[in-house]
Amino acid sequence: MDLQAFYSKKTVLITGGLGFIGSSIARRLVEMDAAVRLVDSLIPTYGGNPYNIAGIEDRVHVNFSDVRDIHSMAYLVQNQDILFNMAGTLSHIDSMTDPFTDLEINCLGQLKILEACRLNNPGIKVIFAGTRSQYGRARYLPVDENHPMQPTDVNGINNIAGESYHLLYSKYHGIRAASVRLTNTYGPRHQMRHSRQGFLNWFVRLAIDDEEIPIYGQGDQRRDFTYIDDVVEALLLVGASAKSVGQVYNLGSGQPVSVRRTAEKAIAAAGRGRIRTVDFPADKKNIEVGDYYADFSKIQKALDWRSTVTLDEGLARTVAYYAECREHYW
Ligand SMILES: NC(=O)c1ccc[n+]([C@@H]2O[C@H](COP(=O)([O-])OP(=O)(O)OC[C@H]3O[C@@H](n4cnc5c(N)ncnc54)[C@H](O)[C@@H]3O)[C@@H](O)[C@H]2O)c1
């Protein structure tokens, strides 16, 4: 698919546009000459960071607003061709101690965005960022899109609801929506101040700082990692494709790696750091899902997407990025 031809001159709104994935989509879209508008509330503990748009800040329009504000969303969705809906909370652990914030942003906020679209721009195409945590513990591997959804945390439940609203609005209100269920995504521009938004980016920071990387238990559970550029490519393909409407797609790498091996790779990429084995903390053990890796053959067949950046290469690029600008992230 010729993404350049499709996105050139398109109007695109990105919620969570100063975050890791949202800003990375924005950077690609600017290169393709799209008119890009970002919405972000910069809630301090999440991944929003104005530095993520360094170099393109004059070529995007930034609106500091919260997606739960239906009045600003009603205005912001107008005259937009496509909406990449990347505003969300990610922390599984936070969702267990502060479930209402997770509910407000991942459910109510999503419904408000969709209502804003229904009332002000029903012709828009919306791409939702779903998550592997919607599935919970895998009953079989690799996990395909038909796998039962029994999350082990509040965040997974709210994401099922957020995704379901999108599919419902697609079916009944004519909004052209699709969901991409992401697995662990890593790379430049992720927040690096705490570990609650996924462990691999945190492992990278610990390795760069030559610190100990704690591995809970054996660390032999396998996970699937996709590099940010591959994730952006998938989201753009789904945004551009007419046949994606009403669909959900898993992303994955096809190369599951154990948590321990992942730490070893982060250490190799940084040239520093070491592993320390510790007991599994009770709060983390309760929501641990064990092995997870995705069957992504659906998006492979439908849109010819596959992950192209290996974990070693992606980690090398990530370490190189922070060598240049760690002061904006640490
Ligand atoms: N990164 C991953 O590994 C991963 C995995 C699965 C799913 N996802 C999903 O992808 C999406 C983007 O994740 P990310 O990694 O870029 O996270 P991120 O924290 O870097 O970005 C999210 C952005 O949304 C903004 N935001 C949050 N709540 C908001 C609100 N109420 N109003 C306006 N802006 C708000 C934050 O300020 C932040 O900039 C999320 O929905 C997340 O659930 C990410």
Image (spheres, rainbow, N blue to C red):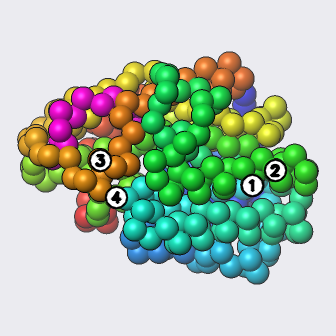
Residue 185 marker? none
Counting residues from the N terminus, which is met first, the one under dot 3 or under dot 1? 1
Neighbour tally class for label 4: few under 14, some 14-19, many 20 plus, Cα within 10 Å: some
Residue 285 marker? 3
Q: Are marks 2 and 1 in contact (CB under 8 Å)?
A: yes
Residue type, label 3: Lys
Q: Name the residue under label 2.
A: 168
- The span from disc 4 to disc 2 (Cα, nearest Å) is 31 Å
Q: Position of residue 290 (x, y in %)?
A: 35, 34
Q: Quadrant of the C terminus?
A: bottom left
Specify start and end residues of the magenta stretch as a single range: 213-226
Counting residues from the N terminus, which is met first, the one under dot 3 or under dot 4? 4
Say which residue appears at 53% left-offset and 72% top-offset.
Answer: 100
Residue 211 visible (yes or no): yes
Counting residues from the N terminus, which is met first, the one under dot 4 or under dot 2? 2
Q: Which of 262 and 162 is in front in this view?
A: 162
Q: Are marks 3 and 1 in contact (CB under 8 Å)?
A: no
Q: Mark 4 points at which residue?
A: 196
Q: What element carries label 4?
A: loop
Q: Mark 1 points at which residue?
A: 165
- The span from disc 3 to disc 4 (Cα, nearest Å) is 14 Å
Which label sits in the foreground, 3 or 4?
3
- The span from disc 3 to disc 2 (Cα, nearest Å) is 34 Å
Specify whether tag 4 is near ligand 1 (CB below 8 Å): no
